Image (tube, helix red, strand yellow):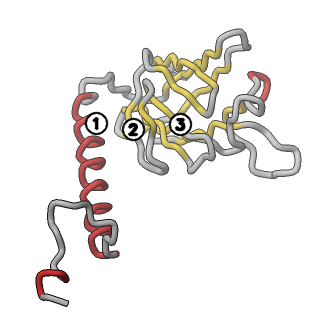
Amino acid sequence: MDDHDTQINDTEPNDSATPFDVRNQAEEALQRFQETLRQRAAERDDLPQFAGAVRLRLLVDGAPMVEYVLESDGDAVIGRSDLKNPLQPHIDLSEQGAYRMGVSRRHAMLRLRDGRLHLVDLGSRNGSFINENQLMPHQPMMIASDDEIRLGRMVLRIDAEEAASA
């Protein structure tokens, strides 16, 4: 066997990627994705800022509207109820068909921080989306009243306005 027989031809694909190569590729992909998230957040920096509590109206086509007041710096879990589980969501979408639409018991969280409304996927099985962009689990993304929110296959709109002072 000659020395040239054992050389690797760089013009042909190499199917034997090492774990190091795969890890580098995964790290690069993660960095690109994180940069995309930062850009999206920067694009949404002009969203309205609330001074206090926010009145939320969750609108699902053909289903009863759900209302909820989210206190300043508060959190509200969105999901569906389960009689066997003592932890119930703050915003229960069971009457809106959550089970058949793939909404988890603890699917997502609405969070009001620094006067901005965020949606956080809680590691749901079927994902959470803002305007067709899937959220990374546990990574908050700012939302506005005109955004389309999808939890599993359930599409809804959230109308948010400053809550009246008591």
Query: From what the image shows, is residue 17 above or below residue 87?
Result: below
The residue at 18%/81% (across/down) is 5
The residue at 38%/26% (across/down) is 50
Q: Which callout, 1 or 3, points at the residue further toward the start of the chain? A: 1
Q: Of all residues shown, which one is farthest toward the top?
A: 62
Q: CA distance from mark 1 to mark 3?
A: 16 Å
Tell me the residue that label 3 is attached to: 128
Q: CA distance from mark 2 to mark 1?
A: 7 Å
Q: Which mark is residue 139?
A: none
- When asked about the image quadrant of residue 113, the answer is top left
Q: Look at the numbered disc 1 and give the secondary structure of its residue.
A: helix
Q: Is residue 37 left or right of residue 139?
A: left
- State the image coordinates of residue 105 (x, y, percent, origin top left): 72, 43
Q: Which callout, 2 or 3, points at the residue further toward the start of the chain? A: 3
Q: Which callout, 2 or 1, points at the residue further toward the start of the chain? A: 1
Viewer-nearest of labels 1 and 3? 3
- When asked about the image quadrant of residue 51, the answer is top left
The residue at 11%/81% (across/down) is 4
Tell me the residue that label 2 is attached to: 141
- State the image coordinates of residue 97 (x, y, percent, origin top left): 76, 25
Contact between marks 2 and 1 (CB within 8 A): the answer is yes
Query: From what the image shows, is residue 11 above or below residue 56?
Result: below
Contact between marks 2 and 3 (CB within 8 A): the answer is no
Q: Amino acid at mark 2?
A: Met
Q: Is residue 156 left or right of residue 11?
A: right
The residue at 26%/67% (across/down) is 24
Q: Which mark is residue 41?
A: 1
Q: Look at the numbered disc 2 and give the secondary structure of its residue.
A: strand
